[in-house]
Image (tube, grey):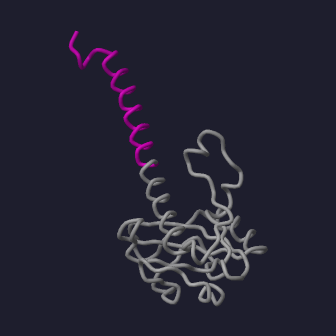
Amino acid sequence: MDLITNPLFFVFLLIGAFFYYRNSRTVLNDQGFALGEAFEGYVQDVLFQERYYVLIEKTHNHIENAHRYVESSLKPDFKFRPRFGGEPFHVEAKYRSKYYNEVQWCKPYQLDRYKEINKFTAVYIAIGIGGSPNCPKYVYVIPLSELQYNTFRPSHFGKYRYPTGYSVHTDKMMHL
Protein backbone atom coordinates (compact mmCIF):
# COMPACT_ATOMS: atom_id res chain seq x y z
CA MET A 1 0.00 0.00 0.00
CA ASP A 2 1.29 3.43 -0.95
CA LEU A 3 2.06 5.81 1.97
CA ILE A 4 -0.37 8.50 0.79
CA THR A 5 -3.26 6.06 0.38
CA ASN A 6 -2.65 4.48 3.79
CA PRO A 7 -5.39 5.65 6.24
CA LEU A 8 -2.94 5.66 9.14
CA PHE A 9 -0.86 8.26 7.31
CA PHE A 10 -3.79 10.70 7.42
CA VAL A 11 -4.52 9.94 11.07
CA PHE A 12 -0.91 10.72 12.02
CA LEU A 13 -0.94 13.78 9.79
CA LEU A 14 -4.05 15.15 11.53
CA ILE A 15 -2.64 14.43 14.99
CA GLY A 16 0.62 16.13 14.05
CA ALA A 17 -1.23 19.15 12.66
CA PHE A 18 -3.31 19.40 15.85
CA PHE A 19 -0.25 19.42 18.12
CA TYR A 20 1.59 21.85 15.87
CA TYR A 21 -1.37 24.26 15.91
CA ARG A 22 -1.83 23.95 19.68
CA ASN A 23 1.88 24.51 20.39
CA SER A 24 2.12 27.46 17.99
CA ARG A 25 -0.79 29.15 19.76
CA THR A 26 0.88 28.56 23.13
CA VAL A 27 4.10 30.13 21.87
CA LEU A 28 2.19 33.19 20.56
CA ASN A 29 0.30 33.54 23.85
CA ASP A 30 3.55 33.23 25.83
CA GLN A 31 5.15 35.92 23.63
CA GLY A 32 2.15 38.20 24.18
CA PHE A 33 2.34 37.68 27.94
CA ALA A 34 6.09 38.34 27.89
CA LEU A 35 5.57 41.65 26.03
CA GLY A 36 2.83 42.66 28.45
CA GLU A 37 4.93 41.81 31.49
CA ALA A 38 7.91 43.70 30.06
CA PHE A 39 5.72 46.80 29.62
CA GLU A 40 4.39 46.36 33.16
CA GLY A 41 8.02 46.54 34.26
CA TYR A 42 8.40 49.80 32.33
CA VAL A 43 5.26 51.21 33.95
CA GLN A 44 6.41 50.20 37.44
CA ASP A 45 10.08 51.17 37.14
CA VAL A 46 9.98 54.17 34.79
CA LEU A 47 6.54 55.81 34.70
CA PHE A 48 5.73 55.34 38.40
CA GLN A 49 9.17 55.27 39.99
CA GLU A 50 9.62 54.16 43.58
CA ARG A 51 10.99 57.55 44.63
CA TYR A 52 7.65 59.17 43.72
CA TYR A 53 5.10 56.38 44.24
CA VAL A 54 4.40 53.63 46.75
CA LEU A 55 3.36 50.35 45.11
CA ILE A 56 0.32 49.16 47.08
CA GLU A 57 -0.86 46.25 44.92
CA LYS A 58 0.29 44.36 41.86
CA THR A 59 -1.63 41.63 40.07
CA HIS A 60 -0.22 38.15 39.70
CA ASN A 61 1.42 37.11 36.44
CA HIS A 62 0.06 34.51 34.03
CA ILE A 63 2.34 31.75 35.33
CA GLU A 64 1.07 32.16 38.89
CA ASN A 65 -2.50 32.34 37.63
CA ALA A 66 -2.04 29.20 35.52
CA HIS A 67 -1.27 27.26 38.70
CA ARG A 68 -4.17 28.70 40.68
CA TYR A 69 -6.09 31.74 39.49
CA VAL A 70 -5.97 34.68 41.89
CA GLU A 71 -9.25 36.60 41.76
CA SER A 72 -7.57 39.95 42.46
CA SER A 73 -5.99 39.59 39.00
CA LEU A 74 -9.28 40.98 37.69
CA LYS A 75 -8.24 44.38 39.04
CA PRO A 76 -5.97 46.72 37.08
CA ASP A 77 -2.28 45.76 37.08
CA PHE A 78 -1.15 48.19 39.77
CA LYS A 79 -2.35 50.29 42.65
CA PHE A 80 -0.05 53.20 43.55
CA ARG A 81 -0.11 56.05 46.04
CA PRO A 82 1.94 59.22 45.60
CA ARG A 83 4.80 59.04 48.11
CA PHE A 84 4.37 62.63 49.30
CA GLY A 85 0.60 62.77 49.74
CA GLY A 86 -2.38 62.11 47.56
CA GLU A 87 -5.00 59.48 46.94
CA PRO A 88 -4.25 55.94 45.75
CA PHE A 89 -5.06 55.09 42.14
CA HIS A 90 -5.00 52.08 39.83
CA VAL A 91 -3.03 51.71 36.60
CA GLU A 92 -3.74 49.18 33.86
CA ALA A 93 -0.74 48.68 31.56
CA LYS A 94 -1.24 47.83 27.88
CA TYR A 95 1.42 47.49 25.21
CA ARG A 96 0.71 47.37 21.49
CA SER A 97 3.52 46.89 19.01
CA LYS A 98 1.58 48.69 16.27
CA TYR A 99 -1.82 50.07 15.37
CA TYR A 100 -3.89 51.30 12.44
CA ASN A 101 -5.93 54.43 13.19
CA GLU A 102 -7.02 53.22 16.62
CA VAL A 103 -5.81 50.98 19.43
CA GLN A 104 -7.95 48.32 21.06
CA TRP A 105 -6.66 48.53 24.59
CA CYS A 106 -9.04 46.06 26.26
CA LYS A 107 -12.08 43.85 25.80
CA PRO A 108 -15.54 45.40 26.45
CA TYR A 109 -16.08 43.32 29.61
CA GLN A 110 -12.74 44.59 31.00
CA LEU A 111 -13.79 48.18 30.35
CA ASP A 112 -17.01 47.56 32.31
CA ARG A 113 -15.03 46.08 35.20
CA TYR A 114 -12.57 49.00 35.25
CA LYS A 115 -15.45 51.49 35.20
CA GLU A 116 -16.87 49.85 38.33
CA ILE A 117 -13.50 50.17 40.08
CA ASN A 118 -13.19 53.78 38.86
CA LYS A 119 -16.33 54.69 40.85
CA PHE A 120 -14.31 54.20 44.07
CA THR A 121 -10.65 54.63 43.09
CA ALA A 122 -9.30 56.48 40.04
CA VAL A 123 -8.14 54.21 37.21
CA TYR A 124 -5.56 55.25 34.62
CA ILE A 125 -4.61 53.36 31.48
CA ALA A 126 -0.91 53.36 30.61
CA ILE A 127 -0.53 52.49 26.93
CA GLY A 128 2.77 51.91 25.19
CA ILE A 129 2.83 51.81 21.40
CA GLY A 130 5.65 50.79 19.07
CA GLY A 131 9.32 50.50 19.85
CA SER A 132 9.73 47.79 22.46
CA PRO A 133 7.85 47.20 25.71
CA ASN A 134 10.94 48.36 27.63
CA CYS A 135 11.22 51.53 25.54
CA PRO A 136 7.96 52.27 23.69
CA LYS A 137 7.92 54.84 20.93
CA TYR A 138 4.75 56.43 22.32
CA VAL A 139 3.50 56.38 25.92
CA TYR A 140 0.10 57.56 27.11
CA VAL A 141 -1.33 57.73 30.64
CA ILE A 142 -5.04 58.38 30.24
CA PRO A 143 -7.70 58.69 32.94
CA LEU A 144 -10.31 56.00 32.41
CA SER A 145 -12.97 58.71 32.62
CA GLU A 146 -11.66 60.02 29.27
CA LEU A 147 -12.05 56.65 27.54
CA GLN A 148 -15.62 55.83 26.65
CA TYR A 149 -14.76 52.81 24.52
CA ASN A 150 -12.32 49.90 24.56
CA THR A 151 -10.48 51.54 21.66
CA PHE A 152 -8.83 54.92 21.35
CA ARG A 153 -7.23 57.06 18.67
CA PRO A 154 -3.82 58.32 19.75
CA SER A 155 -4.33 61.50 17.69
CA HIS A 156 -7.16 62.50 20.08
CA PHE A 157 -5.14 62.06 23.28
CA GLY A 158 -1.99 64.11 22.71
CA LYS A 159 -2.28 65.86 26.07
CA TYR A 160 -1.86 62.49 27.82
CA ARG A 161 1.32 61.55 25.96
CA TYR A 162 4.54 61.28 27.96
CA PRO A 163 8.12 61.33 26.72
CA THR A 164 9.64 57.87 26.67
CA GLY A 165 11.90 57.23 29.63
CA TYR A 166 10.43 59.86 31.96
CA SER A 167 8.43 59.43 35.14
CA VAL A 168 4.90 60.72 35.57
CA HIS A 169 5.29 63.44 38.18
CA THR A 170 2.83 63.41 41.05
CA ASP A 171 1.71 67.02 40.51
CA LYS A 172 0.71 66.15 36.94
CA MET A 173 -1.24 63.06 38.13
CA MET A 174 -3.34 65.25 40.39
CA HIS A 175 -4.47 67.30 37.38
CA LEU A 176 -5.27 64.49 34.94
Residue, x 57% and y 65% (percent of image)? 106
**In the picture shown, does residue 7 fall above or below 67?**
above
Q: Position of residue 41 (x, y in %)?
A: 49, 63
Q: Is residue 152 left or right of residue 134?
A: right
Quarter of the image where the N terminus is located: top left
Residue 27 is one of the magenta-drawn residues: yes
Magenta-tinted stretch: 1-29
Please identify the dominant SS of the magenta region: helix
Residue, x 66% and y 78% (percent of image)? 82
Q: Is residue 56 visible?
A: yes
User: What is the residue that sits farthest to the left in this orientation?
Assistant: 2
Q: Is residue 5 left or right of residue 57?
A: left
Q: Is residue 49 left or right of residue 166?
A: right
Count of marks placed on residues: 0
Q: Is residue 104 visible?
A: no
User: What is the residue that sits farthest to the top in this orientation?
Assistant: 1
